[in-house]
Amino acid sequence: MRRPSLLGALACGLLAACAAPTSPGRAARPSSSPGATWAVAHVSNETSGLAGMQLAAQEVSAGKGLLGRQVKIDRIGSDAPSLAGLTDDPDVLGAVVFGDAAVRAAVQGAKQALEASSFSVFVDADLYDAGALLSPIFQMTAPHSWHAFRLARYFGPGDRGYTKVAILREPGHVGDVAARALREAVELRNLKFIDVAAGVDEGISQLLAQKPDVVVLEGSRDFLKLALNGFAVEERRYQGRQKIHAGWRPQIAGFESLLDVGVRPADGTVAAGDYARPQVAPEAAWPVSTFRKAFQKKFSREPLSSEADAYDSVMIMAEALRRAGSVDRPKLLEELEKFDRVRFARLPISLGPLDHVISERDVLGLWAAGVDGKWNFLMRTFTSDLERTNVLEEDWSVFFDGTTPGGEAPFFYNAKSGITTRKEDDLN
């Protein structure tokens, strides 16, 4: 089984949405050249993901374009009426809404219009764990609960042997979702869980009294930067498992958001995520590397993961339109739910009526910060049994030499890149 069904009790609502006509009464998007272009809306006051969307639009529009039309990105604010109003414009393929606050505001305000029109929306917020992944919304990022499972397995008796796990989180919706997921995962392994929702300085003071073995961080980019810096001072810097009780020197960990902060973490810091991240993808003939090179050529910088996700959002919509042959909302949604291992900038995408999460649970693992200050694959965590890799077979050659298609998965310690040490590794 690829992963559990996601929309469960919402299945009836999804089927009803597919059969419903678009709701009347909202004005279509004004266009300087009506009918000449398809549009994809970037619904956010932030710029997160925008560059990836622009690159995708450029590539889709090359040559004869998409069914004879160019694709452009319409950037609009994150106010709810603007998203609801898009549902009546037949030339708009769908919307990309990145940033947790923007997602919650835009989606909640447009809920009725979205469900009535089958208008596709792609988000990077964790609506799955929040119980808010309504049709026809697609979540680009892995839920906190999937990452929490990988983190807890690493912390627990089978690897690090920790007994106390803490989370230091920014107060608010994202932190609540992360804490709930992490608590469930660590308590299943009979580990003590400590939840601290506070500012960085206050939170560190609270944690000092309890001295957890590891502290998981979650919050906005600014919060994570402050927290990483707060734990990087010498008296709190992690120096390896054997030295963890010489004073209080906890290991630092995080969810996927920690990988995009841009601050050098202390050696041994770990963060959950899949292996197809554009910032650190091996230079090999696979889609992640192809996207990375194209992005660097266009923008003269390295892409963020949010930009790869946004790129994929546009490419997914474009592919659904090609298959449908028209912007008929229920038909587009139907084509999206038929995707089976379709690949663009990151990992293969498979969807279904009960599965609207783009990410893949089985290919998640941990990244570790090495002595060079860069994130590296912690290869033993990209396994199901701490032995054989769960990297997809089509990508074995990127990480392993001498692999045989259709054969047994390679042992993680034979990887030609990443950290290949076993669990006895003191630092990692």
Image: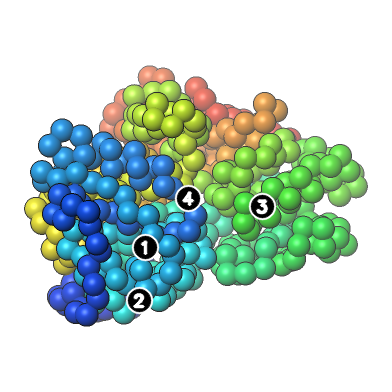
Q: Is residue 402 visible?
A: yes
Amino acid type, residue under disc 2 in the picture: Lys
Q: Where residue 52 sits: x, y (%)?
A: 39, 42
Query: Nearer the N terminus, badge 2 or badge 1?
Result: 1
Residue 310 vs residue 25, the one in the foreground: 25
Answer above or below: position of 104 versus 139.
below
> Is disc 3 surrounded by few (<14), some (14 to 19) or many (20+) residues within 10 Å?
few
Amino acid type, residue under disc 4 in the picture: Thr
Q: Would you name the residue on which mark 2 appears?
A: 111
Query: Nearer the N terminus, badge 4 or badge 3?
Result: 4
**Mark 4 to mark 3: distance in Å?**
16 Å
Marks 2 and 1 close (CB-CB < 8 Å): no
Q: Quadrant of residue 180?
A: bottom right
Marks 1 and 4 close (CB-CB < 8 Å): no
**Mark 3 to mark 1: distance in Å?**
33 Å
Q: Would you name the residue on which mark 1 appears?
A: 4
Answer above or below: position of 15 versus 159.
below
The kind of secondary structure element at disc 4 is: loop
The kind of secondary structure element at disc 3 is: helix
Q: Quadrant of residue 21?
A: bottom left
Q: Where residue 360 sits: x, y (%)?
A: 39, 50
**Mark 4 to mark 2: distance in Å?**
23 Å
Q: Would you name the residue on which mark 3 appears?
A: 222
